[in-house]
Image (spheres, rainbow, N blue to C red):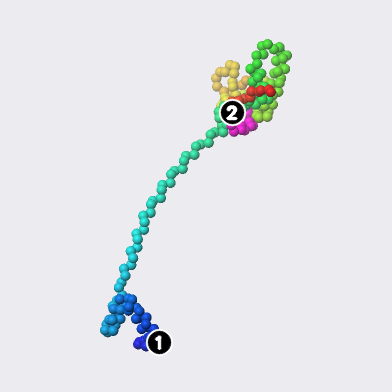
Amino acid sequence: MTPKPPSLLSRIALAISSFFSIIGNPEFAAGVAQLRQGGAPAPAPVVPPAPVPAPAPVAPPAPVPPPAPVPAPPPPLQALPEAAALQLLGLLQRDARFIDFMEEDVAAYGDADIGAAARVVHEGCRKVLREHFTIAPVRSEAEGSRVTLAAGFDAAAVRVTGNVVGQAPFVGTLSHRGWRVTDTRLPLLAPGHDPAIVAQAEVEL
């Protein structure tokens, strides 16, 4: 389809713009000259694309150091083998003056004085036992009664004395019912407390 010829004003504007383009652009001028000679316009020079810069090398991530080992927490004071024994000794000293009584040389005192001191120690020791322990007899029978120990009896709970001959069953007299601790209620030790200090020194000002 033949394009419609431009109007006069359009041709004047085209001529003016072409005039300045011919003066300022040698390639455009060469194309116009070739058109005037009846040839096809020279192809516009192909501008090679700008090279794409290679991506900068990415440094590998720094290795993450392994977490520092967490030291195991120290065992609680109650878990120490001697802590419970020291704690009980401290309670007996606090409530019954048990260590004071046992460390005192009673040879110089009369029986009445020793008896009065022993009563105080007895009351305090009994208070400690009842407050911090539940104690029940190993055997329920009355002392002095005849009992039979069947084969396989608990030798850790019952000790056989006297003329022990042969194997169970044994028949004998219950001389002591024994005691078994069924519950322990020792108080928790405060952090930093030294259980070896069963009684503090006292300074009166």
Report the residue marked by disc 1: 9
Measuring from the top left, give residue 173's x and y in whole percent.
64, 20
Measuring from the top left, give residue 200's x and y in whole percent.
63, 24
Name the mark on residue 90.
none
Q: Which residues lie in the magenta part?
A: 178-192
Sequence-first disc among 1 and 2: 1
Q: Residue at x 71, y 19 (%)?
A: 119
Relative to 166, 15 lies left or right: left
Q: Secondary structure at mark 1?
A: helix
Q: Residue at x 32, y 79 (%)?
A: 22
Q: Which one is nearer the viewer's eye here, 113 or 68?
A: 68
Majority secondary structure in the magenta region: loop
> Is 187 part of what is drawn in magenta?
yes
Residue 58 shows up from this direction: yes
Mark 1 vs mark 2: give the one in front. Answer: 1
Q: Secondary structure at mark 2?
A: loop
Q: Which one is nearer the viewer's eye here, 67 or 59?
A: 59
Report the residue marked by disc 2: 194
Characterize the local packing of mark 1: few (<14), some (14-19) or many (20 or more) Cα atoms within 10 angstroms. few
